[in-house]
Amino acid sequence: MSTSVEAALRARIDAEGSIGLDVFMEAANAAYYATGDVIGAAGDFITAPEISQCFGELVGLWAAVTWQSLGAPAAFNLVELGPGRGTLMADVLRSAVLMPGFGAAAQLHLVERSSSLRHRQRRTLTGRDIRWHDSLASLPPGPTLFLANEFLDALPIRQWAFTDRWNERRIAGDGDAFRFVLAPTARSIPAPAVAGSIYEDSPAIDAVVREIAARLIRDGGTALLIDYGYAQGHGDTLQAVRRHAPVEALAAPGTRDLTAHVNFGAVAATARAAGAGVFGPLEQGTWLRRLGIEVRAEKLGRGKSAEVRESILAGVRRLTDARAMGSLFKVMALAQPSLNTLEGFDPKEPA
Ligand code: SAH
């Protein structure tokens, strides 16, 4: 059975010969997230806030302390990019309001394009005054704390492959299926020119990072970016997941989650070039331990049954253990230029 996004992509390939991977990924993911509640044990993939409430609670405490170090503005935007089921924001608010003044000052904005996920977020965050946005463009001015967990990895990438020259890896039709084809490019690619070498970039991530940086510089604030990724170039990282298992990336677009590892080196370079401060990337395990996740888990388990205590600790281990999510996931913060320290991070390195 072919999906309507599949038919649309096919028509575009018929008209244009081939399309960039970014065009394919953008359309496939928009259709995919529109299908509904794809996150969590019953969905296709699980994320840190769905694994342990300790994750969002620590992000909330971090946000509260950061708000104070920004001078505790009486009104600020608390913006989450790609909020999924709304779980992270719910946990963040529950812990951040322990900081007097934070709750009254925070104006909540969620950047989410999927209407079924917006619906799910509204249910999770019942009773909160929230404004939704399709993109960052419509966010109001003012000091802003951005939060994004597993948002950048969902944004479209392009791929470049070296044979005896650099080519773009594009997508063409192949009977009923899609396949990669190589189209020579004159573009200069910042990766070793070795046969088999693949380089990924993302104009979409660059645009988001530039927009965040411009707002932080103009109005003040920080952005906390958490995702799986690497600090330097890494080859082919495109992956597709359905029902918690890897599947074919180019098959049945709109029925599977397409992601790529985030190039945090590129994010840092784009943010610095725009004039924002950069902290990290740190491994997620390191950052969470510095914020005291083990103490938090211990407290949460106090007075509970041995079974509940063990499940809390198991969740925290999954987030922090290098063999699980502790090492592959990275945490980076972008900030207004005047901020030199941020909780959990090493002091800012000179640009
Ligand atoms: N942060 C959540 C969800 C991660 S899944 C969690 O940690 O559980 C990715 C999220 O980003 C989804 O909410 C998806 O709908 C949203 N998203 C993906 N691409 C987007 C885009 N281009 N614009 C806005 N939201 C997008």
Image: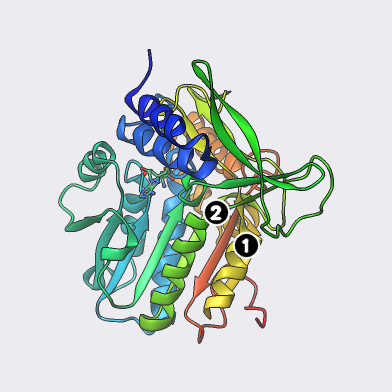
Q: Position of residue 100 (x, y in %)?
A: 29, 73
Classify the position of the N terminus by image quarter: top left
The residue positioned 76% from the left and 55% from the top of the image is 191
Residue hosting label 2: 202
State the residue in front, 338 or 341.
Answer: 338
Residue 309 in view (yes/no): no
Colour scheme shown: rainbow
Task: Single out the mark in the foreground, 1 or 2.
Answer: 2
Residue 219 in view (yes/no): yes
Residue hosting label 1: 266
Please tell me whether residue 43 is drawn above or below residue 89 in the rendered image. Answer: above
Some atom of ligand 1 lies within 8 Å of the CB belonging to the residue at label 1: no
Q: Residue 6: which quarter of the image?
A: top left
| Left or right: 213 in relation to 348 | left
State the residue in front, 244 or 272.
Answer: 272
Q: CA distance from mark 1 to mark 2?
A: 9 Å
Dot 1 and dot 2 residues touching (CB under 8 Å) = yes
Ligand 1 falls in which quarter?
Answer: top left
The residue positioned 46% from the left and 32% from the top of the image is 13
Q: Residue 2: which quarter of the image?
A: top left
| Left or right: 5 in relation to 299 | left
Please tell me whether residue 187 is drawn above or below residue 309 in the rendered image. Answer: below
State the residue in front, 92 or 231.
Answer: 231
State the residue in front, 241 or 73.
Answer: 241
The residue positioned 28% from the left and 39% from the top of the image is 117
Q: Earlier in the sequence, mark 1 or mark 2?
A: 2
